Amino acid sequence: VGDTRTAAALIIGNELLSGKVTDCNLVCLARTLRGVGVRLLRVVMVPDSRDVIAAEVRELSARHDLVFTSGGVGPTHDDLTVDAVADAFGVPVVCSPELERLLRDHFRDRLNAVHLRFARVPAGARLVGQAGLPWPTAVMANVWLLPGVPQIFSAQMACVAAELAGGPTFCSLALCTTLDEGVIKPWLDEVVAAHPDVEVGSYPRWHHPRYRTKVTFDGTDAAAIERARSALLARLPAEALVEADE
Amino acid sequence: VGDTRTAAALIIGNELLSGKVTDCNLVCLARTLRGVGVRLLRVVMVPDSRDVIAAEVRELSARHDLVFTSGGVGPTHDDLTVDAVADAFGVPVVCSPELERLLRDHFRDRLNAVHLRFARVPAGARLVGQAGLPWPTAVMANVWLLPGVPQIFSAQMACVAAELAGGPTFCSLALCTTLDEGVIKPWLDEVVAAHPDVEVGSYPRWHHPRYRTKVTFDGTDAAAIERARSALLARLPAEALVEADE
């Protein structure tokens, strides 16, 4: 897993930190990245503060191959992501001629100064779009500026997947057992020690009707994952196994 | 809002970053904290890595009044939170006699070495429990070590709320309008400028049947919030207002 690309997400919005709104963009991004073999290593959620966002973008951008921001790209006073990303890279905010043309085509006579704010991008940003999507995403260096509105965020995942496809991808296997973690831990420890290139996860399930523990095996080498799963299977009593449900 | 207590959350688990599991503990914690007037300022999600967790706990603990970790407190190889929190504070992990007694009472003859791992706490941690809850939460300095299993996490919120109750609490008002952000932005900017102690949020709704924008007013001063909302109401045409739905 040493050569997989890494990513971080920055989820922006007071409404998320106050619990008024439940974020649903993260899981959508996480699955998209996983599907193209990018390892999401860190997620940070911060308020609508230009300085906080800028500092976070600077750090996440330096430490990861890719960064995805969610939210704060609208036209109002609490939309600070474009300015903050520009701050992070020490560039001004400029009006993108390409975005301005899209706005003029869409709004025509109704176009006003507020609408034009949607054309603001950090200087040097490129636009990543795709046929069928109404609006491109601005990408500044390695930072994708995604909108917080879930319907638009999820629509943009097609662009993200298309742009990042082509690297090694992840494989995943699981097994479910009626035994609890307390019982399987010694066997689990042996398998973990013997398969250092496989990421083994153990998840207790409370009140599940059929099993008590789900064990997952993840990595980029399908054969190694299968070997690790087989090694644990060989240690578990057959009657303690149930079909995985996912 | 200067004297409200601040908090950060550290959500731990590879299964969340891979998108296999959707976190539901954050919103539960966010609402609990909001209910007792604690301002959640930052959320960080990290993998099951002892060093990463320890570094994060150290930083979050130093910069916030309260920190809440979610996950990594079980008995298996991927449960590293107790060790990492101990590392963060430079203390060893010890066996809590109180937790050991609870485990002996529960498991009796079946008690084994794996079960006893649930008694491990950072040296110096206190236990916060409550009648009706089966298990106390370890709190090391200002760091609460909460379990990742959602049913247990949410049950522990009663303890968190009881322990933190008594400070100034937040008030919140909203209004919904059929106008889009592009139209109301000038009025919104005036209201934001005139009411610096009120946190004003503007949220576009895509495809909502009755309105296009929801504006929220938040803070600790109920009268100030009401004044800010009234100021925006006075600027909006009456026919553009609809009843708030939440």
Image: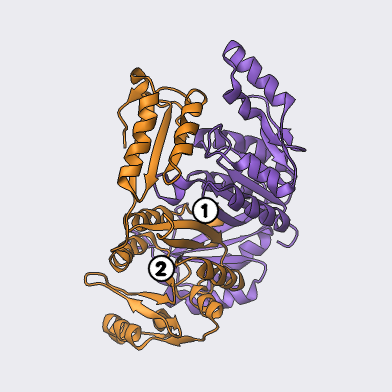
Chain colours: A purple, B orange
Which residue is found at the position 59% from the left and 47% from the top?
A50
Q: Which residue is mark 1?
A: B20
Q: Chain of mark 1?
A: B
- Whether residue B128 sits left or right of residue B55 in the image: it is left
Vertical position of residue B112 compared to residue B165: above or below: below
Q: Chain of mark 2?
A: B
Vertical position of residue B235 compared to residue B57: above or below: above
Q: Going by the picture, which residue comes out furthest to the left?
A: B131
Residues B173 and B121: in front is: B173
Can I make out residue A48 in this image?
A: yes
Check disc 2: other Cα within 10 Å, few if <14, some if 14-19, many if 20+: many
Amino acid beneath label 2? Leu
Q: Position of residue A40 (x, y in %)?
A: 62, 54
Q: Going by the picture, which residue comes out furthest to the top?
A: A109
Can I make out residue A39 in this image?
A: no
Vertical position of residue B213 compared to residue B135: above or below: above
Q: Which residue is mark 2?
A: B146
Amino acid beneath label 1? Lys
Which label's residue is closer to the chain start, 1 or 2? Answer: 1
Secondary structure beneath label 2: strand
